[in-house]
Amino acid sequence: MDAGRFDAVVVGAGFAGLYALIRLRRLGFSARVVEAGAGVGGTWYWNRYPGARCDVESVQYSYQFDDELEQSWNWSERYATQPEILRYAEHVAARHDLKRDIDFDTRIKSAIWDEAAAQWTLTAENGRRYIGRFVVMATGCLSAPNTPKLPGLEKFAGRRFHTGHWPHEKVDFSGRRVAVIGTGSSAIQSIPLIAAEAKSLTVFQRTANYTIPAHNAPLDPAYVARVKSDYKTLRRRAKTMPSGIDFDFSPQPALEATPVERERAYRERWDRGGLIFMGAFGDLLLKKEANDTAADFVRARISEIVKDPALARTLQPTNVIGCKRLCVDTGYWDTFNKPHVKLVDLNARPLEGFDADAVRAGGERFEVDDLVLATGFDAMTGAMLRIDIRGKADAKLADKWAEGPRSYLGLAIAGFPNLFTVTGPGSPSVLTNMLPTIEQHVEWISDCIAHLRRRGLARIEADTGAEEAWVDHNRTVAGTTLRSTCSSWYVGANIAGKSRVFMPYIGGFPAYIQKCEDVVKAGYEGFALA
């Protein structure tokens, strides 16, 4: 069953896929978006767990290509919730009449390159086939939920949920005995709300995580008016920041400040809340001694908040702050002061298995009605590798990436012509504000396709040498920071058998933009055009 031939087929209808469709249309290309879900939104379509919200302030986590949209859309809170972000995605889709070019409930299972015809054939699980000169993989960085092989999980007979694939209807935990496995971002956001409803809540923790209070609140209309009066300046400043987020960053080294100055700086940012905490000093991710001062501050706050000293110690992270994704929360640690909330340290009491109505750990049965798996994602590569992607000479992407992802700029892959990745491994992606990063990628890709058309060219492919050089550069830059020093999903440590490679580019958004621009100015240096 052929769905048609297109200049470009876009896989995914999240923010990347939506903008790719807008850009391709504007440039006069025929395009089709294929989406596994029943609606737009990508990550924000699937992640509907209680408390789900963005950790980038809403006025910055937004498109900037549409001036009128910037002015007309009004966010209600400092950090937007999942329902509000999904409404925003729906609004953009309606505003630009995008749904007529999107096939929903259609999951791509394979993408095969035809060398003779210089085109891709994509086949969906429902049998539809899409022919595209170009393919844009807008599959997202955190869109392949990870369900680890927990012993005896199939024996559990109660309700089971995964935070990355949550039901669309309201899940009522009232009067229920609930277990949450995992203490990453989705757990930290959902645990306070689940505890507010549940009869009892047992949290199974493998690794304690750092989290900073969000201090979320309704947006002040006067503040919003100031932002909207000069949005372009805010966006320009953001593009000069390593994270692509406009926030107060101090280059002063922590070790050159006095203990009183450090305490004051950390306290001020703690009280303001959010990711700006890591901007207190310029060397927090460069020197362990500097990082320890920030980590000690957070551990001290946990001891202040959690009343039971032994419990507080169990909740205190021991690794480098910031080497795992820093979390932003509302009332997380205080939740453990509630008498019906229990923490189980899986390091001291290993998970042993499941019964129909219980979780077994450390020789004890914890009877529960509902099980919430907050076990994260197969990040960066999972969504793409769940598709059978084959390039030149029928080479499998899964084989090429078996020892870690390899790409040129996180945009293209040697051996896979005319296939582009949006915020793929090797790009700043998850270390930045994703919306501006997505826009930069989509604009580069669509401009590249337009360039090929102007030149009368049919294909583009990353050179193996350029790809190798970029992979080496990525590895070298990652080695200069503390981010690569712990077992995080940045290196795939949460997935059994996955090669340990620091996947995002840590050199910063400004340096990355400059590199992409230099490549174009040099006639698409590092690419073979034909």
Image: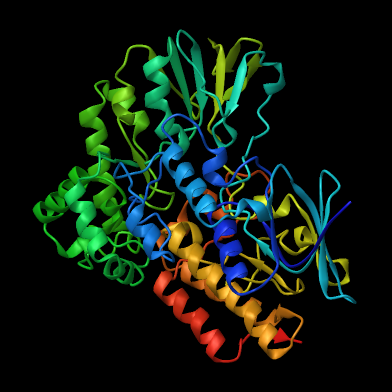
Residue 381 placement (x, y as % from top left): 64, 55
Is residue 306 rendered to the left or right of residue 120? Answer: left
Residue 185 placement (x, y as % from top left): 44, 39
Report which quarter residue 214 is drawn in: top left
Is residue 119 rendered to the left or right of residue 20? Answer: right
Which residue is depicted at the point 32% across and 23% down? 335
Is residue 101 rendered to the left or right of residue 473? Answer: right
In the image, is residue 340 above or below residue 405?
Answer: above
In the image, is residue 50 above or below residue 448?
Answer: above
Is residue 247 rendered to the left or right of residue 185? Answer: left
- Most distant residue in the left direction: 260
Between 260 and 185, the residue placed more toward the observer is 185
Between 412 and 20, the residue placed more toward the observer is 20
Which residue is depicted at the point 24% across and 21% down? 307
Residue 482 placement (x, y as % from top left): 41, 59
Which residue is depicted at the point 72% across and 86% down? 529
Which residue is depicted at the point 43% across and 59% down? 63
Residue 30 placement (x, y as % from top left): 70, 68
Between 229 and 418, the residue placed more toward the observer is 229
Report which quarter residue 300 is drawn in: top left
Residue 163 in sight here = yes
Residue 487 in sight here = no
In the image, is residue 453 above or below residue 396?
Answer: below
